[in-house]
Amino acid sequence: MKQLILGGARSGKSRYAEQLAGLSGKRVLYLATATAGDQEMAARIQLHQQQRPSSWQLIEEEICLAKVLFDHDATDHCILVDCLTLWVSNLLCHENPRLLDEQKTALLEILPKLSSDIIFVSNEVGMGIIPTGELNRRFVDESGWLHQALAPLCEKVTFVAAGLPLALK
């Protein structure tokens, strides 16, 4: 089962994804894409780590998502990827301008071949005003295009608002 869970900041999407992972009955691997670029983000990461069950394996990868998913693929695994928008941000800010397209293509190509349950968490960033600044607009565009490409490959797509899940697919 492949799932995409979308929502705004503080919508409850990560909590919902963690509940699903815990109920999967499988060994949970938490694939974190965040980097602690400042103290506030480091505190957020630490809080997330404290809230997760200690039995869950933590994998930190900010760039090579497809490779890590492939390397840890197993029918008895549930891999929770949190979050895709941080991953897109990491790729957009990388010195290699082609890396985003390369890594996105790798993810979309490998996903149908994987036997693990995979839960993707991502921020829905396209519901507000068009941001100022080229990088900000590109981030919104790339995130939206990734969601549109990923949704058909997932059996379930859920939007979370105010902690309430709404099934889209």
Image (spheres, rainbow, N blue to C red):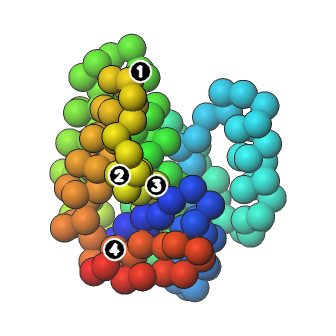
The amino acid on which the numbered mark 2 sits, given as a three-letter code, is Gly
Q: Position of residue 103 (x, y in %)?
A: 29, 37
The residue at the point 37 percent across, 56 percent down is 127
CA gap, disc 4 and disc 3: 13 Å
**Is residue 91 toward the left or the right of residue 151 in the image?**
right
Q: Which mark is residue 126?
A: 2
**Is residue 127 toward the left or the right of residue 28 in the image?**
left
Q: Nearer the viewer, residue 49 or 43?
A: 43
CA gap, disc 3 and disc 2: 9 Å
Q: Position of residue 51 (x, y in %)?
A: 77, 64
Vertical comparison of 131 with 20: above or below: above
CA gap, disc 1 and disc 4: 29 Å
CA gap, disc 1 and disc 3: 20 Å
Q: Which residue is mark 1?
A: 94
Total marks placed: 4
> Quick check: marks 1 and 3 in contact, CB under 8 Å?
no
Q: Which residue is mark 4?
A: 157
Q: Which residue is mark 3?
A: 123
> Which label lies toward us, 4 or 2?
2
Classify mark 4: helix, strand or loop.
strand
- Tell me the quadrant of the picture where the N terminus can be found: bottom left
